[in-house]
Amino acid sequence: MHWLTAYPFATVSSAAFYLLLLSLVFPRTRAFAVPLFTHPIPPTQEYLRGFDSLRGIAASGVAISHCWWATYPVFAYSQSAALFLAYGTKWVSIFAVLSGFLIYRSGLSAIKSVVSIRIYIIRRFFRVYPVYLLGVLLCLLLGQYQSNPNLNPVAYFFSDLFMFPTVSWPGGFANPPTWSLYVEVAFYAALPLALIVAGQRRIVALCSIILLAMILADDQSRVFTLWRYFLFGILASELSPRLPRRVAIVCAAVGTVLIVLDFGGPRLDWAAKLGIGVKHPDVQTLGLGLGMGLLLAGLPHLPRIGRLLSWPPLQMLGVISYSVYITHFFYIKANFPEIEFFTRLGTQEMTDVFRTHPQFAALYLPLVFFPGALFWGAVSFLLVERPGMMLGKVIASRGKRLQEFDVSSGLRGEIV
């Protein structure tokens, strides 16, 4: 009973998530629930089964790792039983490889004309910004924009509102997970330009050269390091269609083994031990990028695995993954009002505060506490993310009609 009463908000939220999962079991409720948790915008390329679920698993890995880290040592027993909880950054890297693979495929269709690039930008904006804005407003409501020696609250707020950390604004950001979102937004902007300059025929050579250069110039900056995972994703996207099925099976198997080994921790960072790059304290390894790239390259050729990953609960997890990623720190704070400022998390001061809390058995975090974060991610998807994407779809469709008008009138602006 203590498990259920210790953090009542988490208990109620997790119960709501379990009810949501239960709705996927019965045909009548499943017919109502499944359409709600689908992307309202059809993909611009062939839909790849299982990829959304992998994004959901990665986002959930980040979120549950932060539940452990932000409140240490409350959930220390969970991390002792599952060492991967200490490697939240690895899930961010996995997410980046997935983005590189999928966004590259969208980028290929975006460079056909000026109008198609405009549509690409509109879709990306309304895919990312509405939920991001929700995070900014929640940070404002919770008083996260406080003065520090480098900035004032107004500057702090407007830097987040306009995503200035994307261009290395030096003052920081209020919602901790957004550090990687800023890198991803920069990738969204750079990709069409790279395709225009290099073209699809030269993109493999370009990405290979840049990846090699980044390894030779390796640095412990997590922002610099994250960029190379997008390149692994692009290379995997180009490799995948060229793989015979038997080779694809081998690639997926080898990739899976490399990923599993990589989650064994720094002692299994074989690339760093061989002197390839530097050893990263946040375990952003080359082995993880290579393993994930091989897995993604082979997965489209493995329909049975794709169907398995498309199991409705996993599919729903993938659909709400971005909302979970942006909102989970607010869920942690809702359960731990002792957290005044996110910037103080991980300090000795906050560790001492959480030492006064009872510690829970290993299963409490994954079964009772964490599912509530998924529920609020689902709420965010339904109330903010999905309407935002639908609005982007309407605006983009107007651009498409403009493109059709340009074609009929002979005014289409082709990119040479």
Image: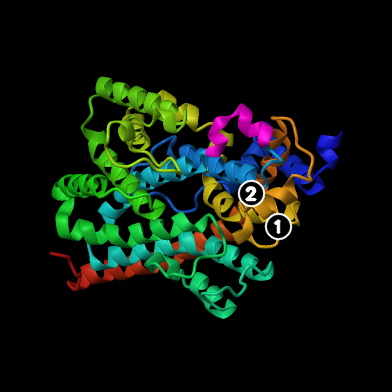
Q: Quadrant of residue 291?
A: top left
Q: Which of the two residues, 356 or 230, is positioned nearer the viewer here?
A: 356
Q: Which residues, given as a range, are shown in magenta?
A: 76-86
Colour theme: rainbow
The answer for how far apart the CA atoms under marks 2 and 1 are is: 9 Å
Residue at the image point whose x is 63% and y is 67% from the top? 144
Residue at the image point whose x is 58% and y is 67% from the top? 136
Relative horizontal placement of residue 126, taking residue 82 as reference (left or right): left
Mark closer to the chain start, 2 or 1: 2
Q: Quadrant of residue 123?
A: bottom left
Q: For mark 2, does the 10 Å Cα neighbourhood hold few (<14), some (14 to 19), or many (20 or more) residues?
A: many
Amino acid under label 1? Ile
Q: Quadrant of residue 186?
A: bottom left
Looking at the rendered structure, the number of numbered marks drawn on it comes to 2
Residue at the image point whose x is 33% and y is 50% from the top? 219
User: Circles 2 and 1: CB distance less than 8 Å?
Assistant: yes
Residue underneath mark 2: 70
Q: Position of residue 49 (x, y in %)?
A: 42, 35
The secondary element bearing badge 1 is classed as: loop
Q: Position of residue 133 (x, y in %)?
A: 55, 66
Residue 328 drawn above or below residue 404: above
Residue underneath mark 1: 339
Relative horizontal placement of residue 323, taking residue 416 as reference (left or right): right
Q: Position of residue 326 (x, y in %)?
A: 56, 55
- Per the image, is 176 magenta? no
Residue 297 visible in rendering: no
Quick one: quadrant of the N terminus? top right
